[in-house]
Image (cartoon, grey):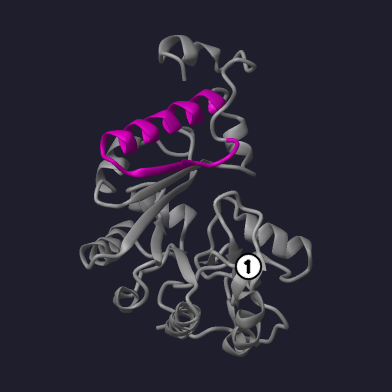
Amino acid sequence: MKAVKGYIERKTMLYKTGVEYGDYTMNHVLGCAHGCKYPCYAFLMARRFGKVQSYKCWIEPYLVRNTLEILDWEIPRLKSKIESVHLCFTTDPFMYEYDEIEQMSLAAIRKLNEAGIKCTVLTKGLLPEALADLSDENEYGITLISLDEGFRNRIEPGAASYQKRLATLRNLHDRGCKTWVSIEPYPTPNLIEQDLGEILYALKFTDKIIFGRTNYNKDVGSYVRHKEFFHEQALKVINFCTENGMQCHIKDGTMFDVEQDSQIYPLRKNRGGY
């Protein structure tokens, strides 16, 4: 197990998220040891606003040690406004091999559940089995953009292996939990040649898939068919989820208006109205 770099304190924890599928969120860690090189939007924003000075600082996480105390104060005040709380948008609640972060995340979820608040979770680490003993309303997810471990080592160097992530997700599913997968940011073929169908097949057991394009990466922009590519892949996700009775959410900006975008218009002609 690894130790956090140190501890910080904050004055607030729960806040309204601007993500289209989110409600409230909490981020009880500064930084993320997974060190994703998509590049990571959370890191870019943290550096821009002076919360961290460098990538090296970002991958040495600090735990917010007064997380539970803040929740004790905020939950009664905000409970009536909250539909669900997401862990997390700017860090990872189950950062790989960081037991102290895992324990704080579990304690926070328990506290929220005890107040009748549903939680959603997304990680590139391992989902602990203890989650199965919490609220039946919770939803537990992993990020999975490939099955290629060589690619993961390059792009998500500190994260858990794809197979280990899938195994912990499958375990929670088999124990009756609601599970989901985020396939975002999905890479273009100039970053990695892969078959999205193989990834989707590995996720057939789960309840929901969220799919989104890669942003903030100059290599994606250099791939001349990136608009068509993301549109085509989104259609594959929609069709797969429809055929298998799964929920599906396509992130904003991943599919394009076929009537207005001439680059995408041939897809409408070839694919019967999409």
Q: Out of 258 and 60, give the one closest to the viewer.
A: 258
Name the image quarter holding the N terminus: bottom left
Q: Residue furthest left?
A: 174
Residue 110 lies left or right of residue 161; in this view the side is right
Q: Quadrant of residue 29?
A: bottom right
The residue drawn where x is 50% and y is 78% is 112
Q: Does 233 appear in magenta?
A: yes
The residue drawn where x is 46% and y is 43% is 249
- How far across and how far down the image is residue 177, in percent? 30, 65
Residue 254 lies left or right of residue 273; in this view the side is right
Q: Does 213 appear in magenta?
A: no
Residue 247 lies left or right of residue 22; in this view the side is left
Placement of 159 over or under 145, stated as above or below: below
Instruction: Give the dominant element type of the magenta stretch: helix, strand or loop.
Output: helix
Label 1: how many Cα within 10 Å (few below 14, some 14–19, many 20+)? few
Q: Out of 253 and 14, give the one closest to the viewer.
A: 14
Magenta residues, as a range?
226-253
Q: Could you tell me which secondary element the residue under label 1 belongs to?
A: helix
- How far across and how far down the image is residue 99, in percent? 42, 83
| Residue 90 appears in the rendering | no
Q: Residue furthest front?
A: 80
Placement of 187 over or under 127, stated as above or below: above
- How far across and how far down the image is residue 120, in percent? 46, 64
Q: Residue furthest right?
A: 49
The residue drawn where x is 37% and y is 51% is 150
| Three-letter residue code for mark 1 | Lys
- How far across and how far down the image is residue 110, in percent? 44, 82
Q: Quadrant of residue 5?
A: bottom right
| Residue 52 appears in the rendering | yes
Residue indicated by mark 1: 81
